[in-house]
Amino acid sequence: MIIDTHAHLTDPVFDSDREDVLKRARDAHIEYIIAVSYDLETAKKSVTLAQQYDFIVPSLGIHPHAAQDYTGSYKEEFERLFNENEKVAVGEVGLDFYRDISPREVQRAVFDEFLAKSVECSLPLIIHNRDADTAIYEMISRYPKGSLRGVFHCFSSTYEFAKKVIDLGFYISFAGPLTFTNAHDLRDAAKHIPIERILLETDSPYLAPQRYRGKRNEPSYITYIAEQIAQLKGLSVEDVSRITTFNAKNIFRIGTNPDHGEIAYKIRDALYLNITNACTNACTFCVRYYTDYVKGHNLKLETDPSYDEIIAAIGDPKQYKEIVFCGFGEPLLRLDIIKKVAAYVKEHGVKVRIDTNGHGNLIHKRSIVGELKGLVDTISVSLNAENEKEYNRVCQPRFETNVFEEVKKFVLACKEVIPSVVITVVDQPGIDVEKCRHIASDELGVPLRVRTLNEVG
């Protein structure tokens, strides 16, 4: 399933075949469409449309082009409509300094009202921003961090601006322009923005993707945006659909996300096994401290799964390029289960990888590396620091002394029996990545993979 987070379904160009357009949206597995308004008339129509179709939800706002109309009886009628009807967002609102159809001071005043309304109603904003990065950032950054939430729709700015507004808690939404032949800078920005902060939209009937450029856009074309994001991120379209749908449900509080933990979860062409939530580290950056989800998958387990439950969750191993032991906890806490499951997977000719914190020998109070011989093709060990002091600060291991050195010894032992050994470090403040790189190459003789902070999976 997928969500079109921004469509102008009330536009007159849909009047002759709106029912067919919505049927094609359903056929394209669109779970929800947010019918976004931009003035009083479209706000009324969006409310009516949402009452007619259970997969359409309205957002109510005044576009900056219509800001000059937001006064007197017009404003009173909009306020009444807004207060009396269900809605999932405030928008489309914002600033447009490209066309300047409404005077800039009027745009600012109206946008300021809607910022306050967003906080008052605890609703996300759908922000229109054209050539107004500085002004919009100045206005939204006045609010305490976390008090405003929302999305910058049909994003057309820079990665640097995206980072700033993401840091304030906002999402970034991409539409048809991402697919345009000459949109190299926009695609580069999308490539670097964490997918955990990305939404999809069509902005129908405007800005059709490259394949239909110049023609009427419609919600079913959102698949082309998903395909472009998948290509940029090295993910599958299924991944992008699941993750962005999860994001949209969170920000707009529509629908439901999975409420039970998954044992096996697919990302790209690999299957990941979440076999425990226990861990011997309490890493300050660990995703499990602020969400139960990774790439749209719920990983919060009630109990550790049995061997039979894990095998059932895997299904046919041959449908995956690789089986990876990696969940919310440290997999080597369950060494015996790993050995049994890995043996089963290898019998089917599929590669096995373990993502670990490198505490296996400390956990079991013996050298366990030899027990993995022939069962594991790749092991990825989280080093995450350049020395013992920083390791203890960032990873907060439950063991008391020399853990950093023990992790390095574990890596060296793995080199003797496992074909591929990699260490990883999360690029975050206080960590010297270059020193970690030297440790990888000069001390350990293994590759280093640098992970992006807050981007998991």
Image: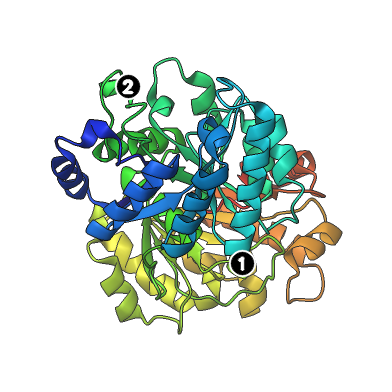
Q: Is residue 104 visible?
A: yes
Relative height, residue 226 to residue 295 (above, below): above
Q: Relative to 414, does residue 214 appear above or below in the rendering?
A: above
Residue 379 point in image, percent of width and height: 52, 55
- Secondary structure beneath disc 1? loop
Label annotation for residue 290: 1
Picture quadrant where residue 342 is located:
bottom left
Among numbered discs 2 and 1, the one appearing first in the sequence: 2
Displayed quadrant of residue 116? bottom right
Image quarter for residue 95?
top right
Q: Amino acid at mark 2?
A: Gln
SS under mark 2: helix
Q: Nearer the viewer, residue 163 or 145?
A: 145
Q: Judge from the rendering whether residue 450 lies leftward or rightward of residue 431; answer left or right.
A: left
The percent coordinates of residue 360 (x first, y second) are 60, 70
The residue shown at (49%, 27%) is 187
Q: Is residue 422 above or below residue 314?
A: above
Q: Residue at x 39, y 16 (%)?
A: 181
Mark nearest the camera among 2 and 1 is 2
Q: Residue furthest front?
A: 73
Q: Label 2 belongs to which residue?
A: 210
Q: Residue furthest right?
A: 389
Residue 326 in sight in this render: no
Q: Amino acid at mark 1?
A: Tyr
Instruction: Using the numbered discs, state the Cα–Cα distance from disc 2 to disc 1 in whole angstroms.
Output: 38 Å
Q: How is the image coloured?
A: rainbow
Q: Residues within 10 Å of mark 1 (few under 14, many from 20)?
A: few
Q: Answer with left or right where residue 23 lies relative to residue 386.
A: left
